[in-house]
Amino acid sequence: MTTSKAPAKRLRADAQRNRERVLEAAQELFAAKGIAVPLDDIARRAGVGPGTVYRHFPTKEALFEAVVSERIQRMVETARDHAKAADPGKAFFDYFQQVVEQAALNKDICDALESTGQQLKTACQETEFNDVLGKLLERAQQAGAVRADLTTTEVRSLIVGCLGMYRRAVTESRPAHELIIVFDGLRPTGSGDE
């Protein structure tokens, strides 16, 4: 028995331009407002009708997933780069802080990382993000830079918690001292790191 995958349907040039405009508008609006942004607003920003948006993305969740998947993929690539670093502890903490700082500026990433809904499962819960985060954690633990009893799930929960704290600090124009406190709690007792 053979199975053949049908070749991807190639879009006309004008349809491809419309799709790109929709994605660009969605990236901007989702980053600012998260998944709550109405599709009509995205269509208006893209300069197309709502029907054009629905032809390319049958649901708002499908459009959100397309936007967020690309952003999470960039986060995964960054984590892979950090996983090659000579100092696993520094790589772990630098990546944790980078994710918090970048995600806090994009409401869509915050929504995706905080999500437990099935509609975002492909985009965030079942991505390579958890795997590479786990690899960074494991390397840091083996180097003695991070508590041995910490799991990837717990680290992800801490990232989500830090997003809110970091956004509040930015809004209040003050340093995000809470990250230092969280990082101290992640280190083994008596590690002596700053």
Image (spheres, rainbow, N blue to C red):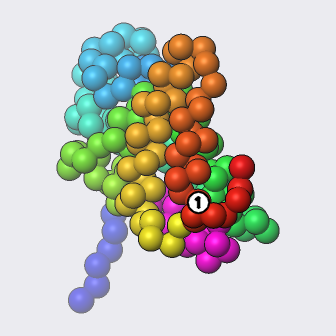
Question: SS class of the residue under badge 1?
Answer: loop
Residue 187 at x, y = what percent? 59, 60
Residue 167 at x, y = what percent? 49, 25
Q: Residue at x 25, y 47 (%)?
A: 116
User: Which corner quadrant of the image does residue 160 belong to?
Assistant: top left
User: Which corner quadrant of the image does residue 59 belong to?
Assistant: top left
User: Was residue 157 drawn as part of the magenta stretch in this picture?
Assistant: no
Q: Amino acid at mark 1?
A: Arg
Quick check: 125 above or below 150?
A: above
Q: Residue at x 69, y 66 (%)?
A: 88
Q: Residue 74 or 23: which is nearer the viewer?
A: 74
For the magenta stretch, what is the residue range?
Answer: 129-146
Quick check: 188 above or below 8?
A: below
Residue 55 in view in this figure:
no
User: Was residue 138 drawn as part of the magenta stretch in this picture?
Assistant: yes
Q: Which residue is mark 1?
A: 187
Q: Residue 51 or 31: which is nearer the viewer?
A: 31
Q: Residue at x 29, y 43 (%)?
A: 115
